[in-house]
Image (cartoon, grey):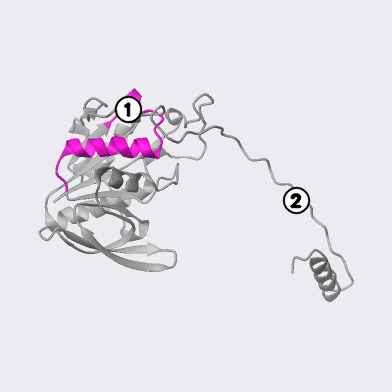
Amino acid sequence: MHAIVCIKSVPDTTEVRFNPETNTLMRDEVESIINPFDTYAIEEALRLKEAHGGKVTVLTMGPPRAEKELKEAIAMGCDEAVFLSAREFAGSDTWATAYTLAQAIRKIGAYDIILCGKQAIDGDTGQVGPGIANQLGIPQLTYVFKIREISFDARSITVERLLEEGREIVQTKLPALLTVVKDINQPRYPTFRGIRAARRMQIPVWTAQDIDADPQYLGLAGSPTQVVRVFTPPKREGKVQMITGDSPEAMAKVLVDRLLAEKIV
């Protein structure tokens, strides 16, 4: 069994600034963490390894400082890590990010399952996981709440999806990509042994040339969607009218009359 987990380094605060020229996040000015939803994907991959054997590879794309998040994933129990970091990747939208990660997965080689968090807390699009599956031409199972059954011999997986209107049971063939919700498990903490292993590990850094990526599909220039303008919405101003009266009943009658006059009820 070979599971690949795609994670993202995200700001550890909402106090971030945007580059006024590119309209992209200035990530170097704030501390970063593993995207919280991705920790559940890591945990589920580790549980699959414990149940079936094999290995877990963690993959991310980001600036040099994002290596810290890969080290944390190794400390949690992942076996290998791959780091995509090059200037040409900067400013990627969800499509360009999915393309780049898919190219890296092709280079990594054979795999049985890919796991991602359902979305990132900075972008909140939920598009990268499905985008990777589309690029690789494999099934995607989103909002996975539980892996009900998986057989690496029969090359099949059955999952339970958590939807707004209820739960849905879906079966498909492996390899497949799963995006998981936080209800699927409880992520473990890094172990002392894992932390020591992470410190010693030399994580390979891949560029566009290493993954045989087409330059026209990379970074800000290769992104079909771009942020045109970033602004703070104006504050909403409200007016308050105090209702007075001799008794609660009298004030209630005045309130009802006004609501009816304004056709609110």
Q: Quadrant of residue 74?
A: top left
Q: Quadrant of residue 194?
A: top left
Q: Residue 133 placed where, x, y %?
A: 28, 47
Closer to the camera in the image, 14 or 22: 22
Mark with earlier residue (1, 2): 1
Question: Please, what is the three-letter code of the amino acid marked with disc 2?
Answer: Gly
Closer to the camera in the image, 36 or 142: 142
Question: Please, what is the three-letter code of the amino acid marked with disc 1?
Answer: Pro
> What secondary structure is found at the residue carrying circle 1?
helix
Give yes or no for residue 207 being in the magenta stretch.
no
Residue at 31% in and 48% down: 116
Residue designated by label 1? 64
Residue designated by label 2? 238
- The crowd level at tag 2 (other Cα within 10 Å; few <14, some 14-19, many 20+) is few
Residue 129 vs residue 171: left or right?
right
> What secondary structure is found at the residue carrying circle 2?
loop
Residue at 13% in and 51% down: 1
For residue 60, say whether it is visible.
Answer: no
Q: Note whether 197 is above or below 183 in the view shown.
A: above
Q: Marks 1 and 2, how far apart in space?
A: 46 Å
Residue 26 vs residue 70: left or right?
right
For residue 40, say whether it is visible.
Answer: yes
Q: Residue 197 placed where, x, y %?
A: 18, 38
Q: Residue 252 placed where, x, y %?
A: 81, 72
The kind of secondary structure the magenta stretch mainly shows is helix
Q: Residue furthest bottom?
A: 249
In which quadrant of the rendered image does the C terminus lie? bottom right
Which stretch appears magenta? 84-111
